[in-house]
Amino acid sequence: MVDTKALDQAFHLFTKQEYAKAKAAFGEILKDENLEPSVRIRVEQFQKMAESRSNGKADALEASVPNVVALLNQGSFDEAEKLLGKAQFEKDLAIFLQAQLEVHRGNVAKAKELLVQAIQMNPDNKGFAINSSVFGPHLKDGLSFLLD
């Protein structure tokens, strides 16, 4: 089981942009052999990001969905957009992630346009959007079309 206090502290350091300390804190968490696989993956991702940033190499992040989502979640929208530009994702996934970026930036109308495209390319994206913590709060206003 994860030490939530240690995990909270590591994420707090990361959020404060104390990347070298965050990297070390994430490393301590990863020493736990009983760490749940899903938590281990997430902690490893943040440790890699902390390492890149502590070395001044934020651009060295791998263009992956978890890295883009992590950047979006921490409010690093410009970095997320750069990573999206480098990524070789399937077109519908790239558009879906761009829609998430637009919601984070407060541009729900643009997000709606992008979601319509992503759903046309892959109907599964509708379900992903409905269940998304990013799009969910907007289901009663700008993204109500998802419930039709």
Image (cartoon, rainbow, N blue to C red):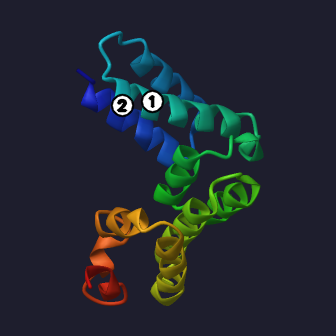
Tell me if mark 1 has few (under 14), some (14-19) or many (20+) residues whose alpha carbon lies within 10 angstroms of its own.
Answer: some
Q: Where on the picture, by quarter, is residue 58?
A: top right
What residue does disc 2 label?
Answer: 38
In this orientation, does residue 36 appear? Answer: yes
Q: Residue at x 27, y 24 (%)?
A: 2
What is the x, y in percent for residue 124? 39, 63
Q: Is residue 90 left or right of residue 1?
A: right
- Viewer-proximal residue among 137 and 23: 137
At a point 36% along the width and 31% down the height, the residue shown is: 38
From the viewer's perspective, tell me whether residue 88 is left or right of residue 105: right
Where's residue 12, x and y in %? Answer: 42, 43
Q: Are marks 1 and 2 in contact (CB under 8 Å)?
A: yes
Q: Position of residue 41 (x, y in %)?
A: 45, 29
> In the displayed structure, would residue 91 be above or below residue 66?
below
Type of amino acid at the residue the image marks with label 1: Ile
Q: Nearer the viewer, residue 135 or 10?
A: 135
The amino acid on which the numbered mark 2 sits, given as a three-letter code, is Ser
Report the disc number at residue 41: 1
Which quadrant does the C terminus fall into? bottom left
In which quadrant is the N terminus drawn? top left
